[in-house]
Amino acid sequence: MAIEDADTSKQLPQVQARKLLSYVLANGEVAFSAHARREMAKDSMAEQDVINVLRAGQVHEPGELVHESWRYRCHTNLFCVVVAFDSVALVIVVTGWRKK
């Protein structure tokens, strides 16, 4: 199955979530929730920091079903960003934080 055919309404394996993040970064759109913007501001995170995490980070944990959408944590050494796929063309940043 091609990554652009992924069913984002179902839990994706971590490897597929990682590939879909790369696909969306290259072909789609990244949106930020109001909550994400507030949490990013608390930890002095810029949009570019989040994009860098989504570009280079790893998805280690299985997706979590929260409010009827699957959430995935993307990690680097410095940050964690939680995303939800609205579709294969849109990822929503739910929250993010700087690791202490």
Image (spheres, rainbow, N blue to C red):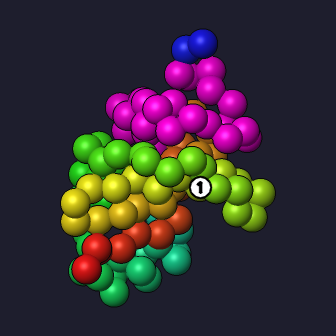
Q: Residue at x 60, y 50 (%)?
A: 63
What amino acid does circle 1 point to? Arg
Numbered disc 1: secondary structure:
strand
Does residue 28 appear to the left or right of 65 in the view shown? left
Name the spot of residue 78 as percent of width and height, x first: 22, 65
Magenta stretch, residue numbers? 3-31
Res 25 quadrant in image: top left
Q: Report the residue marked by disc 1.
A: 71
In the rendered image, the vertical position of residue 37 relative to residue 47, given as above or below: below
Label 1 crowd (10 A; few <14 / some 14-19 / many >=20): many
Between residue 20 and residue 59, name the one nearer to us: 59
Name the spot of residue 51 as percent of width and height, x first: 30, 52
Name the spot of residue 18 as percent of width and height, x first: 43, 37
Between residue 32 and residue 73, name the one nearer to us: 73
Does residue 64 appear to the left or right of 18 in the view shown? right
As for residue 12 lying within the magenta part, the answer is yes
Name the spot of residue 92 as percent of width and height, x first: 53, 55
Q: Residue at x 40, y 53 (%)?
A: 74
Res 1 quadrant in image: top right
Q: In the rendered picture of this protein, how many numbered marks are placed on residues? A: 1
Q: Residue at x 47, y 56 (%)?
A: 73
